[in-house]
Amino acid sequence: MGGGRLMVMGCERMAGGREEEFSRYVKEARPGLRRTAFLLSSDWFEADDLVQRALIAIHGRWESLEHRDRITGYARTIMIRMIISDRRSHRWSREALAEMLPEPEPAGDPYVLLGDRLVLMRALTVLGPRQRAAVVLRYWEDRSVEETALVMGSGDSTVRSQTARALSTLRSVLRGE
């Protein structure tokens, strides 16, 4: 066998190993990323799209990414920035529905203990994307103000003010429930 053929076979094995490594990562991280995406969007379909877009972005940079143990945090950062960007660009163009949606309401959760979670999920829908991201990162993922600011790409004071406003809004919405 010629040296060129060995080189090609070696590259194919390396590429295959990277793809397998990425596939393993996706299988392990996707459920957690999907839950976080749902908390950010309140829509399972949008959450699936958000996770898919983040994984596509990561796949494109997979070979250059170091610190493979921190890739899930990087994926969350990508999703948060994507949803903020998506919501910002559609802020003034979204239509407000005046009538009932054609689809029936989703079936209620059969587990009584999850009732509070459903109430909280409904309450999160009134928050803007930055406020929702601040609350999810600070309290759901139990991150510090500094970590949250880093992920959101903003300052500590912005995170504190976004969180304070979000909590005030959530309190008034939950009192109404």
Image (cartoon, helix red, strand yellow):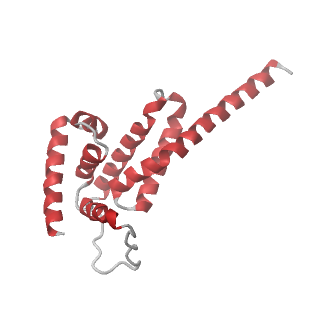
- Total marks placed: 0
Residue 10 at x, y percent in the picture: 72, 25
Q: Is residue 7 above or below residue 23?
A: above
Residue at figure coordinates x 38%, y 46% from the top left: 79
| Up/down of 162 relative to 147, above or below | below
Residue at figure coordinates x 40%, y 80% from the top left: 102
Image position of 117 (left or right of 167): right
Residue lying furthest right in this view? Answer: 1
Can you say whether 79 is above or below 113 in the image? above
Please name the residue shown 30% across and 66% down the image: 115
Nearer to us in this view, 97 or 40: 40
Q: In the figure, residue 121 lies in which quadrant?
A: bottom left
Report x, y in % for residue 65.
48, 30
Q: Is residue 13 left or right of residue 141?
A: right
138 vs 9, left or right, is: left
Task: Name the one closer to the observer, 90 or 48.
Answer: 48
Q: Quadrant of residue 5?
A: top right
Q: Position of residue 60 (x, y in %)?
A: 52, 38
